[in-house]
């Protein structure tokens, strides 16, 4: 499979740590030093659908793929305003895609976009490309009275168009996923609940082991990886994983400071920025990795075609 176009969108409204410190018992220093987050986009009227639509339109435009080619739409989200119809179904309608389509949402929390990417890789064919989206309005399900969680999250969406590889060449690709049925460490009912220290430990351990697994499955050496795009939850989680892997932080694309943790949207927003800023070049060895509620984890290795 190849990623042939990316796009992203974020609400216009930005809230800084300093602004949060005016409405709750926290400080810029605390948030920045514990997480690396400086500000986040927070929806004021935007919805999961409107953000997903903007990101999807941008990805379609960047790919140059005609919308008639899209046969699969997968949306990863935990915060869609409606349970039914699915976000994917509404995207099919609002993008004017054919109704002869497989369109569905999936819930793997912050690993959602990686799960969607892996699903798409199994469903595409030369006549059937996939649109995959991660879109979240987490501000809708964040308890602003809980400073443990409310400072961490933000809103946004990212999208990618997935095409089959050119039959004349083999594009290396490997993946791993895990799911641990845990409803205590990080879960959502009406609001997001989290045991921060346990999530931290889990995330570092799984980032490291999953990077190693996809490398082993693809028979690629760690030194040959040009860029790692990880779920943007916490600077210290990524720095700890980098240390354990023996990789410099420069190999990790980071945009957490400006977005906070946008759950399923975080990886595709980072991917889109990395592509648009020229960090991902043809032939580059890229690892995309995520972890989150569920508990879920996933990683993909691919060579950028
Ligand atoms: N502002 C100020 N103080 C806060 C705070 C905030 N927003 N949130 C919590 N605190 C307080 C706590 O009440 C606690 O106070 P106490 O010691 O008096 O009880 C103290 O800070 C905890 O501090 P510390 O032990 O230094 O926190 P930490 O280093 O464990 O960092 C997290 C906390 C949440 C930043 C960290 O555990 C983390 O990032 N975990 C991963 C979370 C994550 O990424 N989740 C999403 C995964 S998809």
Image (cartoon, rainbow, N blue to C red):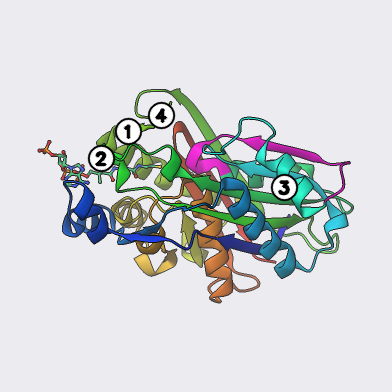
> Quarter containing ligand 1?
top left
As for residue 32 lying within the magenta part, the answer is: no
| Viewer-nearest of discs 3 and 4 | 3
* Nearest to viewer (mark 1 / mark 3): 3
Circle 3: is it few (<14), some (14-19), or many (20+) Cα within 10 Å?
Answer: many
Q: Say whether residue 5 is visible.
A: no
Task: Confirm whether residue 38 shows in the render.
Answer: yes
- Of the 4 image quadrants, the one containing the C terminus is bottom right
Q: Is residue 187 left or right of residue 73?
A: left
Label ID, residue 217: none
- State whether residue 159 is above or below residue 201: below
Residue denoted by label 1: 194
Q: Earlier in the sequence, mark 1 or mark 2?
A: 2
User: Counting other residues with Cα less than 10 Å from the Cα at mark 4, is it few (<14), some (14-19), or many (20 or more)?
Assistant: some
Q: Which residue is mark 3?
A: 91
Label 4 sits on residue:
187
Q: How far separated are the C-alphas under marks 4 and 1? A: 7 Å
Disc 1 vs disc 2: Cβ atoms closer than 8 Å? yes
In the picture as drawn, the residue positioned furthest to the front comes out as 45
Q: Which mark is residue 148?
A: 2
Secondary structure under badge 4?
strand
Could you tell which of marks 1 and 3 lies nearer the N-terminus? 3
Mark 1 CB lies closer than 8 A to ligand 1? yes
Sequence-wise, the earlier of marks 3 and 4 is 3
Stretch of the chain drawn in magenta: 97-112
Query: x, y percentage for residue 274?
Result: 53, 68
The front one of 23 and 112 is: 23
At x 61%, y 30%, the residue is 83
């Amino acid at each position: 499979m190849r990623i042939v176009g990316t796009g992203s969108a974020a609400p216009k409204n930005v809230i800084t740590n300093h602004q949060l410190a005016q409405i709750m018992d926290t400080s810029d220093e605390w948030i920045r030093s514990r997480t690396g987050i400086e500000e986040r986009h927070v929806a004021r009227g935007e919805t999961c659908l409107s953000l997903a639509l903007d990101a999807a339109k941008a990805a379609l435009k960047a790919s140059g793929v005609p919308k008639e080619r899209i046969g699969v739409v997968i949306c990863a989200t935990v915060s869609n305003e409606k349970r039914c119809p699915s976000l994917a179904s509404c995207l099919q309608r609002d993008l004017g895609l054919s109704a002869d389509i497989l369109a569905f949402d999936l819930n793997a929390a912050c690993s959602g976009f990686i799960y969607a990417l892996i699903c798409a890789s199994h469903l595409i064919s030369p006549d059937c490309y996939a649109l995959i989206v991660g879109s979240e309005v987490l501000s809708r399900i964040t308890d602003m009275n809980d400073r443990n969680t409310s400072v961490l999250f933000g809103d946004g969406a990212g999208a990618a168009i997935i095409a089959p590889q050119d039959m004349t060449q083999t594009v290396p690709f490997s993946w791993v996923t895990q799911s641990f049925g845990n409803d205590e460490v990080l879960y959502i009912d009406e609001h997001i609940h989290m045991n921060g220290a346990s999530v931290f430990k889990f995330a570092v351990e799984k980032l490291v082991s999953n990077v190693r697994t996809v490398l082993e499955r693809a028979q690629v050496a760690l030194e040959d990886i040009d860029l790692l795009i990880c779920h943007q939850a916490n600077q210290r989680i990524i720095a700890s994983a980098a240390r354990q892997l023996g990789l410099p932080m420069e190999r990790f694309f980071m945009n957490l400071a400006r977005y906070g943790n946008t759950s399923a949207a975080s990886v595709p927003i980072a991917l889109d920025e990395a592509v648009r800023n020229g960090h991902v070049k043809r032939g580059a060895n890229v690892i995309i990795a995520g972890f989150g509620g569920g508990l879920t984890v996933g990683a993909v290795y691919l060579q950028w075609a």
